[in-house]
Image (cartoon, helix red, strand yellow):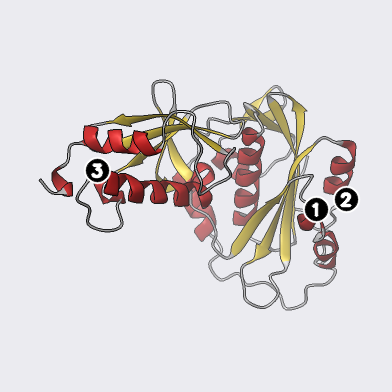
Amino acid sequence: MDGADLPMSALAAAMRGLLPPGSGLRGVGEADATVVDVLARDDDVLVRFRWMAYPHDLAYALHRDSAYAPFETAEDWAGQATVELEEELGTGVVARALRDQCDGFIELTSPDVPSDRRFTVDSVRPGDDLGWKAVRYVRRDGLDPSVATSRRRDGTLLSWHRASVDDAVRSPYVGQCVVVGLDAETALLEQCVATPGTPGSVVLDLCRLAAHSASWHGARSVVTDLEHPALEILGFEHQGGRRVLDTRFLSVDHAAAARLVASEPDWRPPRARRRWGRPHIMSS
């Protein structure tokens, strides 16, 4: 029997040997992902895990072709499949994958939520001193980081997110988003702004990452007083005078996200990057 004929139960057993319940994953922060169980299914091996302080179990399926090279033993396959799992987690699959609600966990599946590859969105936590050195560059590009810096000082900030143009010249900042904690299970999307003329797809990417970041701190819901079409795409619903998002993220409208990303194909950032005027793309 060569590796291609091995039963899923053998592959799962080998994977469980590498990733026993309670273990971490070396490819991401040791404390970021904790294995709950490894299960054999008819056509794949499912790894259930906890992610940071996210309040729901997640799972990711590995298939025979998750091995990068031909394999002869279940242990060979498990070693290669573990690399795929770590790479997917390390490159943001938790925030970009389609999700299916299963019995007791949420499975991360495909396709990814569409995003605008002209922009790069990053995250800065309150203690990430290096990331805060970019404050002056955010100001340089016409954005006011005072909400983020003040929330950092008062201790309510969960994360600050910045969008920049993905180019090889200077990667100017074109948007920012601030999410703060209200209580142990609720976060507030307090601010999301972009420079005038920037496509709405950047708001989609900023708010998506901000909401996921809040969920990794334990938030079961994210609320906001802001208004923008991207919020409805992400699954924010009107409740009690504000918008509320369930952080299971089961209601993302992938088709609408794709339409928003494709809506301004010819946009290019202006050459002049200083003092664009007052940036405003969402309102309360």
Q: Amino acid at mark 2?
A: Ser
- Point 18% across, 37% down: residue: 7
Give how far across and how far down residue 11 sits, in percent: 26, 38
At mark 2, the secondary structure is helix
- Point 51% across, 42% down: residue: 94
Comes first in the chain, label 3 or label 2:
3
Residue located beneath label 3 in the image: 74
Residues 11 and 18: in front is 18
Q: Quadrant of residue 116?
A: bottom right
Query: Between tags 1 and 2, which lies in front?
Result: 1
- Point 74% across, 33% down: residue: 188
Comes first in the chain, label 1 or label 2:
1
Give how far across and how far down residue 143 sits, in percent: 81, 59
Question: Callout 3: 10 Å neighbours few (<14), some, many (20+)?
Answer: many
Q: Is residue 237 left or right of residue 150?
A: left
- Label 1 to label 2, Cα distance in Å? 16 Å
Comes first in the chain, label 3 or label 1:
3
Q: Is residue 21 left or right of residue 161?
A: left
Question: Is residue 131 at all visible to an observer of this figure?
Answer: yes
Residues 104 and 52: in front is 52
Residue located beneath label 2 in the image: 146
Residue located beneath label 1 in the image: 129
Question: Callout 2: 10 Å neighbours few (<14), some, many (20+)?
Answer: few
Q: Amino acid at mark 3?
A: Ala
Q: Quadrant of residue 185?
A: top right
At mark 1, the secondary structure is helix
